[in-house]
Image (cartoon, coloured by chain):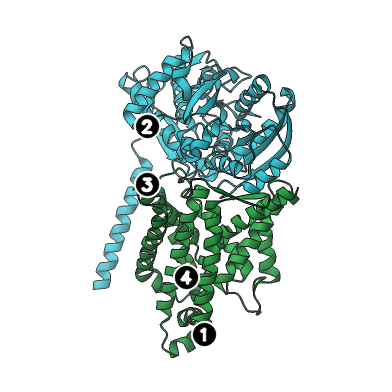
Chain colours: A green, B cyan
């Protein structure tokens, strides 16, 4: 029995780190625009596909999983400069624009990479690590490690650096921020770039595990969004914990509720948080949600 | 002045548009006189050419076009050409239903073929029942040939046949008694799992645990951990790519080392590509065409299958999958019936299709009767094992 419990916790942490990684992107973009970026799941899918293509062309996995996010970030920055910038000031327009972007990216993925799911072999030759009575593959460990690392990086960016604080300021106190010489559009673009990089990177390290297909972005996006909402959307680094909470709850739902209700658990949790504690369960200050 | 000109221009544009619309409404009226032969037989085809069902829909379209071309090159059906009107339902049942209505009402097709996945096909079934025209269905869900099936003829093996093939293999060739099921929550997975639960007792098997997963779930170790706890003799995974491949990985990770049995949903190279070396040893039921080269020389379907594979590979530069076979047989049976009936009158054509006996096709030897609108039986499926990344027929 304990073997089962330990494995469920480990599986939950893996799932949760995946959700959290996707969720960070939501929160990052939200922090400076007040909007939800519905293309976040597609960033991950295209990141994964680019990475798989690069690996297929003979590049090593780790190099590919850095190159691919750079390429996608460049593309997203261009999209921002030419299109999204015009609506970045209004969260509602921006949300609609990102829905359009997600559909376009999905269609492009379909045409470039085809209809079938894609995967690559393990980056660590399938090596596994025994933890107590459970097992994790090295590929899964990489996901958990990346989530932890990003937690620290984002914590530093958003609490210690001027740029991080400015990204939040341009949406929270727009007039004051502008009066003190901050250009909102610059910081909004920056947050999209950061969201794209993290999204694509998550996709890359997910590709040896998950075998994504062009329409996987929908489910990933939903779970990532749920993690971000659980964490309150305000502080991007906390989304990792939102994700891990969701992952563990889902994993244990398999044990506790009848089969098939597992996925409802995430949605019920999302509804409960949105109605009872809209500022998120991890947020200290009570604040309105955009 | 300028504004007047502008207004004049827009009125003109409107008139031009209107006249186009009117012209297309009126159209050249095809008033067919009694007894006069039509120029072509219009057959409506609804397939999932985009969306998640497209890995099925594209090869189905290829096979249909290949066959229609061949029939027309040989002079059509008694001199009448076959014309396929192909619609994409985008793997959306609402669009499938819309397309069916359009093809019947506007295009006046004589019969329908489609669609690729079961939910879309069930949507078409409703429409077909209302209008009353023959419908050839290449999808798998049991429900398609349940209830009122007057106008319904299926060419794919229904889930029940695939399940029976696998369960029979388990009871006759292995000592396994306690089975666990992991299935996709989509229509394909659910229908298969329900059928296994319903039929297992008949084959002396006991279902000890069942878990399901979302189609694009990134990790299945929680479900597998729960299944492992039930301590089954073997695991049956019923789903389409990539779930079954992710399950294999997860089993290896948590040390859930029991034999793995799959569904005909993994009867494709993609599964072997995704699962890699882990795929070796996996056993699943499949249509004979997957291992056509390995069939006995005496099997009448072997020659037909090998010929089709050759033609398909020449034209499309890839191996045909079983879905292509379902669509091919659908059109072939329809065309054969048209030849025999000599008319496209719905009732007459339907009766003639129902009289199809021992048609030798790509899915096996098929016969319909007033009780049976499923052409395929258990004899038409084989059990296949993956060895060194290759399909090997076993038994």
Task: Nearest to the eye among marks 3 and 2: give it.
Answer: 3
The answer to whether dots 3 and 4 both sit on one chain is yes
The disc, 4 or 1, on the residue closer to the chain's N-terminal end is 4
Badge 4: residue crowd in 10 Å (few <14, some 14–19, many ≥20): some
The CA span between labels 1 and 3 is 47 Å
Residue that badge 3 annotates: A56
Q: Element type at marker 4? A: helix
Q: Give how far apart the Cα atoms at labels 1 and 2 are.
A: 59 Å
**Mark 4 or mark 3, which is nearer the start of the sequence?**
3
Q: Nearer the viewer, residue B358 or A276?
A: A276
Q: Confirm or deny contact between disc 1 and disc 2 (CB under 8 A).
A: no
Tell me the residue that label 4 is attached to.
A93
Which quadrant of the view contains residue A235? bottom right
Q: List the residue tagged with mark 1.
A: A173
> Which one is in front, B211 or B272?
B272
Give me the residue at 45% from left, 59% from top: A200
Q: Is residue B219 left or right of residue B79?
A: right
Q: Eyeballing the image, is B294 above or below B278?
A: above
Q: Nearer the viewer, residue B107 or A134?
A: A134
Q: Which residue is mark 2?
A: B318
Residue B205 relative to residue B64: left or right: right
Q: Are marks 3 and 4 in contact (CB under 8 Å)?
A: no
Task: Tell me: residue B10, above or below residue A90.
Answer: above
Determine crowd level at label 1: few under 14, some 14-19, many 20+ residues with C-alpha closer than 10 A: few
| C-alpha span from label 4 to label 2 | 45 Å
Task: Name which of mark 1 and mark 3 comes first in the sequence.
Answer: 3
Residue B43 visible from this viewpoint: yes
Select label 4 or label 2 by which is in front: 2
């Amino acid at each position: 029995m304990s073997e089962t419990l330990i494995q469920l916790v480990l599986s939950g942490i893996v799932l949760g780190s995946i959700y959290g990684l996707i969720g960070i992107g939501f929160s990052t973009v939200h922090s400076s625009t007040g909007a939800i970026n519905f293309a976040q799941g597609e960033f991950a899918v295209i990141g994964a596909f680019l990475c798989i293509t690069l690996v297929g062309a003979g590049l090593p996995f780790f190099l590919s999983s850095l190159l691919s996010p750079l390429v996608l970030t460049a593309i997203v920055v261009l999209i921002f400069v030419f299109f999204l910038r015009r609506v970045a000031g209004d969260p509602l327009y921006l949300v609609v624009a990102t829905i359009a972007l997600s559909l376009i990216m999905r269609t492009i993925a379909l045409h470039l990479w085809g209809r079938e799911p894609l995967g690559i072999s393990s980056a660590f030759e399938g090596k596994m690590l025994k933890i107590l009575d459970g097992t994790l593959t090295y590929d899964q460990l990489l996901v958990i490690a990346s989530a932890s690392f990003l937690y620290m990086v984002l914590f530093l960016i958003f609490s210690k650096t001027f740029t991080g604080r400015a990204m939040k300021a341009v949406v929270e106190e727009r007039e004051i921020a502008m009066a003190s010489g901050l250009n909102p559009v610059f910081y909004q673009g920056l947050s999209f770039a950061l969201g794209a990089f993290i999204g694509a990177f998550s996709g890359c390290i997910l590709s040896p595990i998950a075998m994504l297909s062009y329409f996987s972005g929908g489910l990933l996006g939903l779970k990532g969004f749920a993690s971000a909402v659980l964490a309150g959307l305000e502080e991007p680094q906390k989304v990792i914990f939102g994700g891990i909470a969701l992952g563990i709850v889902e994993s244990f739902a398999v044990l506790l509720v009848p089969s098939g209700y597992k996925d409802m658990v995430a949605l019920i949790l999302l509804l409960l948080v949105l109605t009872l504690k809209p500022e998120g369960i991890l947020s200290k200050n009570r604040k309105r949600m955009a | 002045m300028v504004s007047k000109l502008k207004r004049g221009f827009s009125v003109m544009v409107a008139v031009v548009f209107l006249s186009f619309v009117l012209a297309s409404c009126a159209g050249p009226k095809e008033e067919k006189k009694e007894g006069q032969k039509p120029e072509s037989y219009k057959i409506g085809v609804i397939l999932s050419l985009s969306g998640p069902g497209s890995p099925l829909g594209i090869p189905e379209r290829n096979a249909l076009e290949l066959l229609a071309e061949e029939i027309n090159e040989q002079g059509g059906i008694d001199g009448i050409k076959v014309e396929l009107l192909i619609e994409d339902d985008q793997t959306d049942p609402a669009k499938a239903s819309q397309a069916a209505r359009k093809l019947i009402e506007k295009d006046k097709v004589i019969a329908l073929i489609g669609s690729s996945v079961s939910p879309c096909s069930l949507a078409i079934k409703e429409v077909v029942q209302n209008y009353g025209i023959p419908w050839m269905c290449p999808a798998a869900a049991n429900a398609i040939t349940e209830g009122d099936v007057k106008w319904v003829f299926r060419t794919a093996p229904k889930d029940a046949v695939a399940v029976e093939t696998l369960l029979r293999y388990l009871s006759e060739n292995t000592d396994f008694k306690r089975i666990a099921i992991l299935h996709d929550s989509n229509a394909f997975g659910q229908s298969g799992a329900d059928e296994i639960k319903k039929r297992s007792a008949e084959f002396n098997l006991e279902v000890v645990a069942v878990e399901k997963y979302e189609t694009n779930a990134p990790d299945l170790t929680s479900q597998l951990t729960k299944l492992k706890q039930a301590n089954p003799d073997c695991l049956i995974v019923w789903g389409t790519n990539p779930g079954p491949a992710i399950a294999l990985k997860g089993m290896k990770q948590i040390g859930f080392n029991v034999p793995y049995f799959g569904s005909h949903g993994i009867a494709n190279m993609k599964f072997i590509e995704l699962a890699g070396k882990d795929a070796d040893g996996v056993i699943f039921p499949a249509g004979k065409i997957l291992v056509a080269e390995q069939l006995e020389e005496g099997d009448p379907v072997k020659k037909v299958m090998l010929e089709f594979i050759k033609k398909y590979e020449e034209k499309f530069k890839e191996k045909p999958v079983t879905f292509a076979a379902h669509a091919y047989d659908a059109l072939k049976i329809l065309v054969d019936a048209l030849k025999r009936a000599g008319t496209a009158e719905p009732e007459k054509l339907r009766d003639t299709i129902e009289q199809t006996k021992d048609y030798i096709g790509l899915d096996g030897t098929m016969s319909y009767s007033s009780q049976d609108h499923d052409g395929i039986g258990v004899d038409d499926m084989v059990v296949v094992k993956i060895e060194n990344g290759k399909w090997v027929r076993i038994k």
